[in-house]
Structures are given as C-alpha cells and as structure tokens.
Image (cartoon, grey):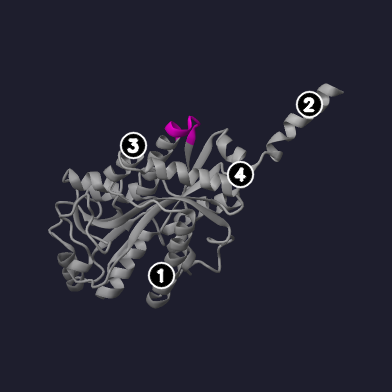
Amino acid sequence: MDRRLVWIGCALLPATLPGAAIAQAYPVKPVRIMVGYTPGGGVDTTARIAAQSMTEAWGTQVLVENRPGAAGNIATEFTARAAPDGYTLVLCNIGSHGVTPARFAAKLTYDPIADFSFPARFGGVPNVLMVHPSVPMKNLRDFIAYARKHPGKLSFGSSGVGASPHMSIELMKSIAGIDILHVPYKGASAALADVLSGNLEASVGNFAGAPLSAIRTGRLRALGVTSGTRSAQMPEIPTFAEQGIEGFDVTGWYGLCTQAKVPVEIITRINTDVNRMLGTGQALRQRLVDQGIDIAPATPAEFAAMVRQEIAKWTKVVRETKLGGD
C-alpha cells in the first residue's frame, strides 16, 4: 500500500509543481514548430534555422512540421486547437497574424489574438519582386511602365492567394493603376523555381532564404523591396517607395506563437531563451541575419501589441483596396 501511494504521488507531482519548477523543466519532450507553407520558402527556412538553434540550446529536439495550404491558415488553426502545454508552436508571420485575419475575419474558426500568446519575435523582412535576368526590366519603374503599355500581359507568381507577398503586389497594383496577372503556387519555392527556369516573368516572396541567395548569385534580378527602408543585407536594391509608390511599406516579420492558455512560466522561458539566442554574437542571430532578417526581439506583450497593429493595418488595406476574400 505504501509503495502504491508513493507511485500515485509521483504521478501527480507534475500537476502540483509550482510555475517556476514547470518552466525550469520545460521542455521535457520534443517541441513542434508548425509551418503553414511548403519547404524552401522564407517561413520554412526561418523555422528550420530557429529549430536548429533551439535544439542546440535546450538539448531537446525541436522539429519543423509543414502543413501547407489556405495561405498558412491550416497550420495556424491546428496550433490554436493543440494542447496548451508549450509543445506546439507555429512560425507566425505577417500572413498568419496580419493579412489572413484581415481578409477572412468572419470565416476563421479561431481568434488570432484571444486564442494565442506571442512568446518570441525574431525580426522583420521585406518582400522582394524578382525577375529572370533575361527580362529587360531593370527596376520597378520599368516593370510598371511595361505593365501600363501592355495591360494583362505580365504575370507574377507567389506562395499563394492572400499571403503577404501576393497582397503586397496587389496593393502596389492598386496604387500604380496597373493590370498584371497573379499566378498562385502552393509555396514560395515553386514560384521561385519557375522564375529561375524562365517559365514565368516575375515572382514575389520573402527576402529571406532562397530569394536572397538567387539574387546574390545573379540568377535573379531584384526590382525592389517592399519595406519602407532598404535591406541591410543588399542595400543596393531600392524600395518600392523610392521608385514612385509613395509611402509604400510592407515589412514582413517572423516569430513564435502558441496557445493563449500555455502557462505564463513557459511563455517567459521561451521568450528569455530565444531572446538570449538572438543576442550579439549568438548563432541564431547570425543565421537569421545571413538570411536577410533584421533582428528585432520583443517581450510577449510587445509582440502581441504589434500583431494587433498589423491586423488593424491590413483590415484597412483590405477595405480600401477591396482585396478581401470571397
């Protein structure tokens, strides 16, 4: 009987541990980072870089799981419904917690704010409009001028309908008054591959990952970045705003989100550890910088406030440009 009581007591111990002890023990099993896009794009690349550094720091596997579709919404919804224990995160971004809530607010089965907590932000990254080197356009001004002379003749690919890259070009089209055809793919890597092969004139995607590499090696030509300021990684690429789209600023961002009911001690542990990994001289920081990401760590409260601002911003854009979902 005594042995049975000891066994029962041990089994119940995790439920009675104080918050500090729970956070200190975390993680005790593999952690998943959900990605709402196919492998090879900026979101996926960032998730894998983060997972590698987190695995090294924690001594526990951090795995990336791709669940592409619905402009990233499948992975976001899955995360919202997962057990609130800190072991299912999502690589949240401007698409999942900015554009998608603005376009499909009435259709979402979760609340992008109330159902989530925001333990760690990595930083920001622009989208970039790219063309094959054989295309005669040298910059965004050339691209717009051609589109005005030949309405409906130009095409651009993206990671999918409603994602941040697609929406940034739709916004640019609305401001510039041009007609170009959107070709949606199931992921950024597929769109990029068709431009690299010359099967498509242009593609737009997050600067991070494969696009940055393709531009650096001369396999693609960058026409402009969507952020309000030039990228520190390739400052020679002008912004859209510098090329006649006044006030244009679409800056993507990456972070880790999880369920709202995850214990605050675990949220604090993730934030503290990730922010430490993003410090000067740390491997995660350098790996992300090499991918074109401007590092911008934040507290969970600061990150949540930024997400609310993003949803408000894109809601206004969707309303004014009539770019909402069907």
Is 181 drawn above or below residue 5 in the view shown?
A: below
Which x, y percent locates residue 215? 20, 48
| Residue 184 in view in this figure | no
Q: Residues within 10 Å of mark 1 (few under 14, many from 20)?
A: some
Q: Decide which of tag 4 and tag 2 comes sooner along the chain.
A: 2
Q: Decide which of tag 1 and tag 3 comes sooner along the chain.
A: 3
Considering the numbered disc 2 on the image, is that residue within a helix, a strand or a loop? Answer: helix
The CA distance from mark 4 to mark 2 is: 25 Å
Q: Which mark is residue 6?
A: 2
The residue shown at (87%, 23%) is 1
Amino acid carrying label 2: it is: Val
Q: Residue 145 or 115: which is nearer the viewer?
A: 115
| Side of 16 relative to 131 (left or right) | right
Q: Any magenta on residue 14?
A: no
Q: Which residue is mark 1?
A: 313
The residue shown at (24%, 64%) is 154
Considering the numbered disc 3 on the image, is that residue within a helix, a strand or a loop? Answer: helix
Question: What stretch of residues is rendered in magenta?
Answer: 55-62
The CA distance from mark 1 to mark 2 is: 56 Å
Q: Which residue is mark 3?
A: 283
Q: Residues within 10 Å of mark 4 (few under 14, many from 20)?
A: some
Considering the numbered disc 1 on the image, is that residue within a helix, a strand or a loop? Answer: helix
The residue shown at (65%, 41%) is 18
Q: Which residue is mark 4?
A: 85
Mark closer to the observer (4, 2): 2
